[in-house]
Image (cartoon, coloured by chain):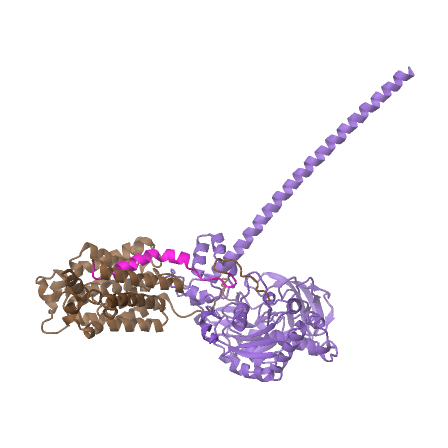
Chain colours: A brown, B purple
Amino acid sequence: MITYHKPASGAHVGANKSVSQIMGQVMLAITPATAFGLVCFGWPALFLFLITVASAVLFEALCIRLKGRPAKPVIMDGSALLTGWLLAMTLPPWAPWWIGVTGSGLAIILGKQVYGGLGQNLFNPAMLARVALLISFPIEMTTWANVSPLFFAHSPSFAESWQITFSGLQNLDAYTGATTLGYIKTEFSQNHILPDILQDYSALQNFIGWTRGSLGETSALLLGLGGVWLMRQNIIQWQIPVSLLATVAVLSGIFHLLDSNHYVSPFLHLNSGALMCVAFFIATDYVTSPNTSAGQCVFGAGCGLLIFVIRTWGAYPEGAGFAVLLMNSATPLIDYYIKPRIYGRDRQGKPLEIPKP
Amino acid sequence: MLNGLGWLKPPRIRGGVHAEERKANTATQAIVSNFPLPKKLYIPLQQHVGKPAEPLIRVGETVLKGQLLAYSQGMISAPVHAPSSGTIVDVNDYPAPHPSALPIRMIVLETDGKDQWLELPEIGDPFQLSPENISLRVGAAGIVGLGGATFPTAVKLNMGRENHIDTLIINGAECEPYLSCDDRQMQERSEQIIDGVRLMLHGMETHHAVVAIEDNKTNAFYAMAAAARHFPAIKVMQIPTRYPMGWDRQLIRYVTGREVPVGCRSSEIGVTIHNVGTAFATHKAIRHGQPLVSRVITVSGGAVGKPMNVEVPLGTLIAELFAFCGVDSTQTARIVMGGPMMGDSLPHTGLPTVKATSGVLALTQAELKSTDEQPCIRCASCLTVCPAGLRPVDMANHIKANQLDAAVDIGLKDCISCGCCSYICPSNIPLVQYFKYASGEVAARQQAQHKSEQTKKLMAARQMRLERIAQQQLEEEQARIAAKKERERLQAEQETAAS
């Protein structure tokens, strides 16, 4: 018997987990939070979501065509879809359509394809796009719609929603307000203290996500559950989420204990969906995070530290995007210094000494 | 109290994967012993690490089963015996059981169907024999590591005696998926294996042995534990099921907590490791005087109609094995010798089984890992699963960029080709293929460099020699001229004196 033979080394069998399956499972994990966000913010959010995701896929296809390669197999790996999806989750839900398109263009073209495509980029594409949008279009990127679920009396109708997405919002203030963190920052600037500021804060509403915020980032509960499920599925490891959340909790805990009038409690930090989203879905991006467990702990802790610093003393109420990008740039350095020890060698790579009997 | 701090110590298992086992259809049936004797056996002269054996029979000679066909030569080598009785019909080059199927020297034996043993020596109590005598007999029986490493067992026994081994580990991990030949042997031949272990202990002058069996083989564990219950020197233990648990160094670390330094043999840190099959072969060699002429092979895979463990004479062609086991050739996408993680793919079935053959698999396309290579997403699974602590992704990137020296610098030579990284990679990158290619290429380059250096040296030596010869000739010439002048001068003096 002769088989078609191309010399192949082991392993001849493989784990049945492909790139597209990994992407698919991440999408499944963020589906509840996204669906909840779409329900909370109604038709405009749905339009923005579809536009962002579709344009991300189209930009990816365009880039691949420009490279002269067939686009379909690359699209099918699901990475562009996931990038668009994650970006849409972090946008203000009622942002105009061109925010979504511009964001996707930034993420796919500048964030990913100029580096050479999947696996080659230095920065997290979704965060790169979000930060670029925030700096370029501060008004559109900080206009937060009130919770106005589908089919509720005061919610915009389909036609009004169409207008919101495609011609811009007319009567802005009637429908919008500040996010919790944004509100606290504004109030601090007027020398108010925390107990007064947080009179209306509802922990439960923030926990389930019934609050103003980014399209898919309001629900700490659903994002946390999705993240834990991803860990159970062995798609992400515990190192980055745990070190990130623990760093934020410890730092904010220390400062809150020292001065509870001016430093937000760790509970409120952890109860924000944005932090959960970053900890489980953004910072854990394989491509832009370190390879070793120890490196991942350093990376997560660095993200947590920067998030806390920016939230507490920075000009922006939320610092997750900046924090992740800064730590992304440190990833090659972390991977350079933190390496696994080779069996039978010490950390410097020299053979171990034979123990004397 | 101090035990509570155990978690601070380095972990005893690192990396590894738990692949789908697919052992059930062979592990639950008894070893088949009625394999029909093949008409011809193809016996390679090299079935072990070291120098090939040297044939001492001639074509046309008749031999008996167990008769010495080729003798061991050199320190590290092993002899080869006739797996059955019959006539030697050829000693020539035939395709090797290797991915290349390049020809190597083999003895072809046409069997006479009688399967008649050589007259075997009577052996009394082997524990009265000296340890040196034990390893001598093990060596003469052609026993090599049957787990697949095929290192001559006698050499290991000798090294054991020289290095004062405190622990002999018997490897019953059998961590490769599909394979169950060790499992079945431990279930059916536990008494003989334990006896073999005792003989090995005697041969190495060691007093403590640990039989390590993965905890997915509970029947084997109970059988072995029962067989060892009267021998306090032998401890049978269960170890976690996690490929590559049977990698000697992983097993040594798990059982003893010791790590073998790079560049050392395990005997240098007081541990030696042997496979259960080797222990059984030792028992047969010492108690019954039978050399190694057959072995148990797992035949399995999706294309095999009757998967089984079967005892076959060495040199049986895979084609005959497949015919016996009902392999559907139309379904076979790849033939693998060994396990699916580390085994070699073979181009065809006209190749013989050898001492190293623990299994032969006929895998269907559905069982194979996809070869549709996609870009690396840096998921770092390959780092997580690497038992050697390497960074397969970085090594592969260096190799792709043809920076082989950089790949060597970050640990290419410490790769054991266990296949965990290839197995786990979601992008189907054939990492081990890259590493094997690079290792071969590095060796070839070193050889080429060595050759050019040798050539340079020879050239320089030749130059010096030529110069020296020229110098010599010049001096001789000058001496001759001087002598001639002297002669002429003397002659002139004589002539003047005469006149």
> For residue A153, what is the image quadrant?
bottom left
Res A312 → quadrant: bottom left
- For residue B267, above or below residue B494: below
Q: Does the image show residue B429?
A: yes
Q: Residue furthest right?
A: B498
Position of residue A246 measured from the top left corner of the image (x, y, whole percent): 31, 68
Q: Nearer the viewer, residue A60 or B380?
A: B380
Name of the residue lying farthest toward the front:
A258
Residue B225: x and y, percent? 57, 83
How many numbered tags mark residues here?
Answer: 0
- The stretch in magenta equals A316-345
In the displayed structure, would residue B314 be above or below residue A283? below
Give residue B326's position: percent from left, percent from top: 53, 77
Please say whether residue A55 is visible from this viewpoint: no
Q: Looking at the rendering, which quadrant does residue A39 occupy?
A: bottom left
Q: Quadrant of the C terminus of chain B?
A: top right
Q: Residue at x 55, y 70 (%)?
A: B252
Provide residue B417's location: percent of width, then percent of height. Answer: 51, 64
Q: Is residue B251 magenta?
A: no
